[in-house]
Amino acid sequence: MRPLRPSGAPFPPRAVHPQDPGVHHSLRIAAALVFALQVVAIVLASGQARAAQLTLSWTDNSHGAAATRLERWSADDAAFALVANVPAGVTQYVDAGLTPGRIYCYRAAAYDTTRVSGYSANACAKTPPAPVLSVTVKKTGGGMVVSAPDGLTCGTMCSATYPASTVVTLIPRPAAGSAFIGWSGGGPCVGTAPCTVTGNIAVVVTATFGTLRTSASPEAQGSSMNPVLDAINQMLGGVATPDLGQ
């Protein structure tokens, strides 16, 4: 199959005599491309839309006399289709807006106003997978942790993944007779308020719940030596102590 002009029309065949100087030019066009493919890092577009890009590069043996026609194929395509007509002298093209985690194959042909080369050998590459936000919650004591958007409902430990840049709020829910003591483990979660995480990283946090005890219990006498527990004690009239056995 002969490559087509940018307009879609086929290039006409041209009969030449072996002594015609154009023969040497035609041979130079036919050998114009040494094709290579390089994968470039995935990019994130606005609005949380995820897209990948590949950078194509090649060697122009026509010394700037030939333009380049680039065609692309993937598993969803019935045949190679035109991607771009690259001007003479340019030997690199960035194919953006691709689907992450998919294999794409390319081929190229060199051409000028009257001549065209055959296609290069196919060059294939797989775009990197889409980045994700990974959230892992460990829990001690009587309670659970849920997330908004949904995905996490934690007993002892749970984890979930979300598209990169998703804003995930972790919400502690104490069981009856318990209170939420706080987050630990570093990262963005501190204190006792619901915690918000985002980005394209792995986040690991621990949620600690304590058992509420009545003021009549021996533990209720004096300070718990923990300001968070003391505050809960003042609000609820009891003493909350970490219960690591639940």
Image (spheres, rainbow, N blue to C red):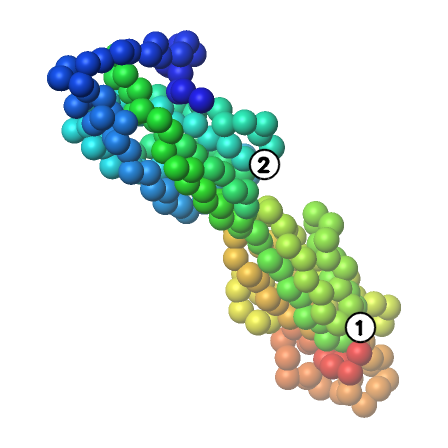
Q: Residue at x 54, y 27 (%)?
A: 79
Q: Secondary structure at mark 1?
A: loop
Give neighbour class at mark 2: few <14, some 14-19, many 20+ (Cα, 10 Å): few
Q: Position of residue 49 (x, y in %)?
A: 55, 36
Query: Residue 80 at what x, y percent from top left?
Result: 50, 27
Q: Is residue 209 above or below residue 218?
A: above
Q: Residue at x 67, y 57 (%)?
A: 160
Which label is found at residue 208? none
Occupied quadrant, residue 155: bottom right
Residue 153, quarter of the rendered image: bottom right
132 sits to left or right of 229 = left
Amino acid type shown at disc 2: Ala
Question: Element under label 2?
Answer: loop
In the image, what residue type sits under mark 1? Gly
**In-image side of 79 versus 208 (left or right):** left
Pinpoint residue 129: horizontal percent, then vertical percent: 53, 49
Corner quadrant of residue 176? bottom right
Say if 127 sits above or below 20 in the image.
Answer: below
Q: Which residue is mark 2?
A: 75
Quarter of the image where the N terminus is located: top left
Mark 1 or mark 2, which is nearer the start of the sequence?
Answer: 2
Q: Position of residue 187 (x, y in %)?
A: 53, 64
* Frontmost residue, 205 versus 193: 205
Q: Looking at this rendering, what residue extends furthest in the bottom direction?
A: 218
- Say which mark, if any, is on residue 142: 1
Q: Nearer the viewer, residue 163 or 24?
A: 24
Label 1 neighbour load within 10 Å: few <14, some 14-19, many 20+? many
Task: Give the vertical position of 149 relative to 226 (above or below).
Answer: above
